[in-house]
Amino acid sequence: MKGKGPVVHLDRTRKAKMIEAFLIDGLGHEVAGLRILDIGCGNGQISKYFSGRNEVCCVDLSDRRSDKECCSFFSVKDEHLPFEDDSFDVVISHHVIEHVDNQLAHLAEIKRVLKPDGLAYVACPNGGSPLMAGHVGNDQVPTLSGILQLLGDQGFQIEECYTRLLKHPRKYHCETAVGRFLPTFFLKSMRRWYPGHCFLLRR
């Protein structure tokens, strides 16, 4: 895993609440009592948020967490994850895939460590959007067709979530509210220009 291009540093606690709302949709219940893996944990805010009611493991190139006691950290050098098959109920990869050298390997590892009935959340910026501020110059950022191809190649069951976020911004802790005034069919027709992609995935 290597950084490629500048990244905007946002409040990841708010992002954690957004991810939690999507996971509740997919799981059908609260995110509690689960074993969760946070890939590319960065400052550790997402890991810490989920660690209150779950067993959380997190990985990154180096440990940059402000709170090093909330969960277990594992250092990684590439896309390989140091865990056994079928290890996690939930795997989170939030804005990581655009920073790895081998994106197929990254997704294959997510699928490998995910339990058969588990749920993965994968998000990244949209390389086809004119709104991808903060990621200019990163040639690893996938377009909509690119990320769908990658996910399909791994055989995931794919549930697209960004339309939901635009339509119901308050539920998903989104600051941009313009989408709630637009019909869903119109939003879906604009997917290739969304600023980002996010998906719930099942094996």
Image (tube, rainbow, N blue to C red):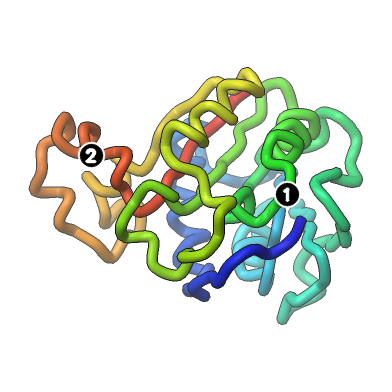
The reply to whether dot 1 and dot 2 touch (C-beta < 8 Å) is no
Image quarter where the N terminus lies is bottom right
Q: Residues within 10 Å of mark 1 (few under 14, many from 20)?
A: some
For the point 68% across and 44% down, the residue is: 33
* Amino acid type, label 2: Met
Image point 59% across, 51% down: which residue?
140
Viewed as shown, does residue 65 lie left or right of 72?
Answer: left
> Which numbered mark, 1 or 2, is in the foreground of this view?
1
Q: Quadrant of the C terminus?
A: top right
Q: Residue furthest bottom?
A: 66
Residue placed at 84% from the left, 52% from the top?
A: 78
Q: Which mark is residue 52?
A: none
Mark 1 vs mark 2, CA separation in Å? 28 Å
- In this view, 138 is above or below 144: below
User: Relative to 42, is 132 above or below?
Assistant: above
Q: Earlier in the sequence, mark 1 or mark 2?
A: 1
Q: Which residue is mark 2?
A: 190
Q: From this view, report whether residue 160 is shown above or below residue 30.
A: above
Count the marks.
Answer: 2
- Circle number at residue 101: 1
Q: Which element is circle 2 on?
A: loop
Q: Quadrant of residue 119?
A: top right
**Picture coordinates of residue 10, whole percent (x, y):** 48, 73
Residue 83: x and y, percent? Answer: 89, 41
Of the pair 138 and 28, the residue shown nearer to us: 138
